[in-house]
């Protein structure tokens, strides 16, 4: 095991299946964990589970595709805990319209709208948190 006592971690997508497990793992290693996600009630549930297990966590509602939203979250986190040591970019996702199945043609059922949404989430949603939280 490793010890992260005294470290502050932010997990984007901390409300998702993988992100919430990452939050819990970081907390189990001693880190204070900011559970960042669009759904505040889900972020709070994950933070409450961490706290109930003896860890330290806070819900940090934000949209990773919006720089102002990320900045507001970073400001709240720094006001509460003073710094950020670890950033885990776990936010991401996919939609059926943005992928092509094994029995489908590239020239067929492909949605540029879905593709644009997924690209924004997976690419911009990684870059913006790196810019905002990384400068801290």
Image: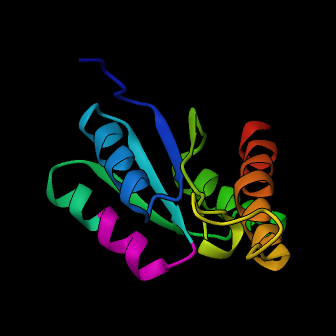
Quarter of the image containing the N terminus? top left
x and y percentages locating residue 19 in the rendered image: 43, 53
Residue lying at the far left in this picture: please name it.
Answer: 53
Q: Is residue 30 left or right of residue 117?
A: left
The answer to whether 94 appears left or right of 33 in the picture is: right
- Name the residue at 52% across, 59% down: 13
Q: Nearer the viewer, residue 76 or 16?
A: 16
Taking the magenta stretch, the answer to whether it contains residue 123 is no
Residue that appears at 14% across and 52% down: 53
Q: Quadrant of residue 84?
A: top right
Q: Position of residue 51 (x, y in %)?
A: 23, 58
Of residue 85 and residue 26, the one placed in the foreground of this image is 26
The stretch of residues the image draws in magenta is 38-47
**Quadrant of the rendered structure where residue 37 is?**
bottom right
Is residue 40 part of the magenta span, yes or no? yes
When the figure is inspected, residue 38 is found, relative to residue 136, above or below; the finding is: below
Residue 27 in the image: state x and y as whole percent: 31, 42
Compared to residue 2, the image places residue 55 above or below, namely below
Say left or right for 123 vs 102. Answer: right
- Main SS class of the magenta portion in the image: helix
* Of residues 97 and 37, the one drawn nearer to the viewer in this rendering: 97
Q: How is the image coloured?
A: rainbow
Which residue sits at x=49%, y=39%?
Answer: 8
Q: Residue at x 79, y 47 (%)?
A: 127
Q: How many marks?
A: 0
Position of residue 7 measured from the top left corner of the image (x, y, whole percent): 45, 32
Residue 115 vertical placement versus 130 (above, below): below
Q: Quadrant of residue 112?
A: bottom right
């Amino acid at each position: 095991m490793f010890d992260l006592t005294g470290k502050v971690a932010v997990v984007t997508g901390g409300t998702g299946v993988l992100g919430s497990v990452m939050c819990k793992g970081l907390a189990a290693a001693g880190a204070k964990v900011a559970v960042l996600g669009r759904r505040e009630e889900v972020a709070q549930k994950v933070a409450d589970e961490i706290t109930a297990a003896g860890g330290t966590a806070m819900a940090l509602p934000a949209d990773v595709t919006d720089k102002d939203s990320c900045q507001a979250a970073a400001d709240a986190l720094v006001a509460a805990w003073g710094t950020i040591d670890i950033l885990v970019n776990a936010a991401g996702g996919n939609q059926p319209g943005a992928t092509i199945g094994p029995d489908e043609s590239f020239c067929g059922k492909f949605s540029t709208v879905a593709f644009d949404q997924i690209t924004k989430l997976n690419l911009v949603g990684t870059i913006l948190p790196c810019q905002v939280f990384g400068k801290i």
